[in-house]
Image (cartoon, rainbow, N blue to C red):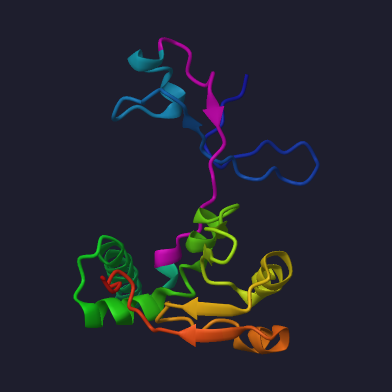
Amino acid sequence: PTTMDEGQSISNGGPPAPPSRPTSSFGFRRRKGKSNDEGPDDSSGGREGIFQIPPVAVPPTTSLLPPFASLTIRIFFGTTVALYILNQKHLLPKPLSSFVSRALFWPTLPITFSRRIGKWITEIDETVVMGGAPFGFAGLPDRLHDDYGVKGIINMCDEYSGPTKQYERLGIEELWLRTVDHFEPSF
């Protein structure tokens, strides 16, 4: 039998084989200083190679950017996440909360949308319906008008004025009482 080092191939007259790629042993560790051709280490119990996982090619995204740009992106992302969490926990002062709510309204819309699936509209009684922002792209204004007979909307969302053109088309009046998230008025 012929032994080969990593990257070598045997020529059989055809095109050369691609260089072999290292694989990882799942659940086994190699002893420091041992190479693949020295045999199994003690932790594998002679079963080296039973659970082989092919390597996953992960592009080094941070190496594509200069160090300053990578650091800037990480700081921006970290700050954004921290402000979002602090805003959701009601820990920001009102002016900062207003800014954060407006800045993160559209980027966090998928989170809001997914949390309200199936419960976007709640019928309180025969005259009052309550729900989240009636986004025009989701067909909610039409549904409010057709299914519930809504003629007026009280919008208390500071960062979103609502689908005003659709309201006009449907004959729905809107009263926009801009209220900063987590600073709702009390009675």
User: Is 105 contained in the magenta span?
Assistant: no
Give percent across and percent down for residue 71. Answer: 29, 72
Q: Position of residue 13 (x, y in %)?
A: 80, 40
Q: Which residues are magenta?
A: 45-62
Magenta-span inclusion, residue 59: yes
Q: Where is residue 44 drawn, in percent x and y?
A: 41, 15
Is 99 in front, or is 15? 99
Seen in the picture, residue 33 relative to 135 is either above or below; the reply is above
- Along the viewing direction, whichever of 15 and 149 lies nearer the viewer: 149
Instruction: Give the dominant element type of the magenta stretch: helix, strand or loop.
Output: loop
Choose top left, top right, bottom left or bottom right for residue 41: top left
Residue at 42% from the left image edge and 77% from the top image edge: 156
Height in image: 80 above or below 125? Answer: below
Image quadrant where one finds the C terminus: bottom left
Residue at 58%, 80% in the rendered image: 152
Q: Quadrant of the N terminus?
A: top right
User: Within the image, what quadrant is residue 10 found in?
Assistant: top right
- Residues 146 and 162: in front is 146
Front in this rendered view, residue 101 or 32: 101
Q: Residue at x 54, y 50 (%)?
A: 57
